[in-house]
Each structure stands twice: as C-alpha cells, then as structure tokens.
Image (cartoon, coloured by chain):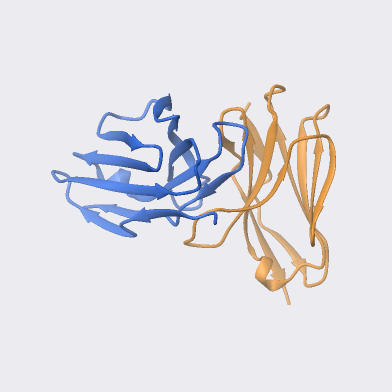
Chain colours: A blue, B orange
Amino acid sequence: DTEVTQTPKHLVMGMTNKKSLKCEQHMGHRAMYWYKQKAKKPPELMFVYSYEKLSINESVPSRFSPECPNSSLLNLHLHALQPEDSALYLCASSQEGGNTEAFFGQGTRLTVV
Amino acid sequence: QKEVEQNSGPLSVPEGAIASLNCTYSDRGSQSFFWYRQYSGKSPELIMSIYSNGDKEDGRFTAQLNKASQYVSLLIRDSQPSDSATYLCAVYQKVTFGIGRKLQVIP
C-alpha cells in the first residue's frame, strides 16, 4: 500500500484565518515532505522531516509552520497567508530521506481570499 | 545553472510511437533519480526510479541514466493517449524537480 492521505482536499481561507493541512501515511516511512505547486510549475520543496525532526526548511516564510507529531503524521499550520500563497500543497513520504522513492498524497488545493 | 534542467516545451507523438524525455542535472553527488507522471489537477505519481548507470525497463517504460554525462531519460514505447500528462524528473540529493514536460499522444 503506497497511500499518503491528505486532508482537506480543498480549502478556502481568508488572510486573517488560521488553518491546518494534515497528512498521514502508514507505510512506516521515516521521511515526510511538504511541497507547494503553482499552476504549470513543478512541485517546490518547502520542508523535509526525517525521523520526526525538521531537516530541511527551504527558507519558507514563517506564516507556514510545519509540525510532525509522530512518524505517521505531518501538519502544516497556516496563518496570515497572502493570495499569492494559493496553490496545490502536496505531502509526500519516503522510506528514508533523500535517496529513496517518495510517494505523494492527492494534495490540498488552497485558495486564499 | 538550474539544478535540474528539462525541456519544457510540449512534446507531441503519434499513438504507437516512442516518446523520449530527457533531463540533465548539475550535482555530481546525486545518487537517485525518479520520473513522475502528473495528470492535470492531480498529484505526481512515481513511475520509474533508477540509481545506477544503464537502462532500467518496466513494461513500456525505460529509464536511462548516464552519470558521467549527468543526464537521465525516460522512453515510453507504444505511446497511448492515456500517457498524455506532464512528466517530471526528480533528482535526489536535495529533492529537486525539473520543470516538467507535457506529453500529448495523438490518436
């Protein structure tokens, strides 16, 4: 089973709202990722967690706050977003960080109004 | 120089033909290479992984890796309309995607 589950599938939020995106995998993977994808662009890495510790932060603005409560769960907390943050947010996981196959969830389509 | 370079213009091939997609990368320390397929509005789906020089075949798909020349390619034989999608190469040392190339298979 190579399933990564993301909720919600769609989210509309105002610029003053606080919301969270959730990601879950039960494959025993020890690395989890957040990507942001704008239309007609490739996924852009935001954060990597390896063994529940943040290992890569690609200079993401602090209005995005990741959290890894345990090895199966990954959250992305959103606060005071801008309309240009509207995008498809993708979660992925892999057995180990970096050099192993990563499997993606279906994504959360975020619209900031 | 971008870490991963991929031709971004659309590629059209007739049904039954071979589609060839290429990627070059700049980091000689890269060890793992992946091809993803992404249908419009969907998330990327892993279709091939390759770690050592040479060819790797899986059904109609063949991945080719040449570390000396720093390129990785994907061949799709007997292309089908269902193969029409954007193909992204990913190079792992630091999880970087190429820009993606849209393939259209014309029936």
- The total of numbered circles placed on residues is 0
The answer to which image quadrant residue A54 occupies is top left
Q: Is residue A108 visible?
A: no
Q: Is residue B78 left or right of residue A95?
A: right
Residue at 43%, 46% (x, y): give it. A91
Which of the image's four quarters has the N terminus of chain B?
A: top right
Image coords of residue B18 (percent x, y): 83, 61
Looking at the image, can residue B14 be seen?
yes
Residue located at (30% from left, 30% from top): A61
Question: Looking at the picture, how far across and down is residue A33, in whole percent?
Answer: 45, 38
Q: Quadrant of residue A94?
A: top right
Residue at (68%, 27%) from the top-left corner? Answer: B30
Q: Is residue B36 left or right of residue A52?
A: right
Q: Is residue A62 left or right of residue A49?
A: left
State the quadrant of the C terminus of chain B: bottom right
Give the answer, above or below, for where A79 lies relative to A112. Answer: above
B100 or A33, nearer to the observer: A33
x, y percentage for residue A113? 21, 52
Q: Residue furthest left?
A: A16
Residue A80 placed where, x, y %? 18, 39
Can you name the residue that lies furthest to the right here?
B54
Depicted A68 relative to depicted B59: above or below: above
Q: Quarter of the image holding residue A99?
A: top right
Look at 25% across and 40% down and name the residue there: A77
